[in-house]
Amino acid sequence: APRVMERLARERLARGKGGKAGSAERLLHLCPVAKKNGRGKVQQRLLALTTGALYNLSADGSKVKRRIDLSALGSVSLHESSGEFVLHVPSEYDYHLAATRQGAHIAPTAAPGGAASAG
């Protein structure tokens, strides 16, 4: 199942869905995450890091739910022991996520200049 999700997500991003017109983004990392929405509900998602943005994809990779341009990402707060992290987007709203240990490694990479605060 994970390979199917990854293939679907890669194909979706390659077709430019959710990206800017004419963008040539390259997928760098893809991992499953649990996203907590504004009402406290936990939703399973895929988080994709490309050369230009972070994408929140549906759990099966078939829909782009949100695109965050890397230049809009202010900082990342990481709680290393739990794998939880917050993507701080000053111009929009923050994203509260939890990932597997492998997925948590995306947080320091995603912040501009690799800056992340650990908690």
Image: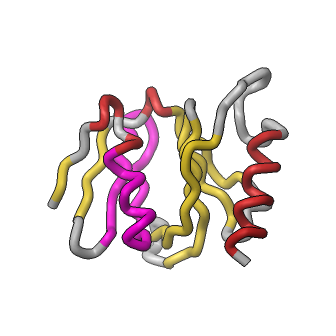
The percent position of residue 50, horizontal first and vertical second, equals 58, 39
Say whether residue 58 is left or right of residue 83.
Answer: right
The percent position of residue 79, horizontal first and vertical second, equals 23, 65
Front-most of residues 103 and 41: 103
**Residue at (33% x, 35% y) in the render:** 74
Front-most of residues 90 and 28: 28
Say whether residue 64 is left or right of residue 114.
Answer: right
Quadrant in which the C terminus is drawn? bottom left
Let me know if residue 85 is in the magenta part: yes
**Residue at (55% x, 37% y) in the render:** 53
Quadrant in which the N terminus is drawn? bottom right
Say whether residue 75 is left or right of residue 119.
Answer: right
The percent position of residue 67, horizontal first and vertical second, equals 60, 42
Let me know if residue 59 is in the magenta part: no
Boundaries of the magenta span: 83-108
Q: Quadrant of residue 19?
A: top right
**Residue at (45% x, 40% y) in the render:** 92
The percent position of residue 106, horizontal first and vertical second, equals 41, 52
Task: Residue lying at the far top in this picture: please name it.
Answer: 22
- Does 51 sit above or below residue 49? above
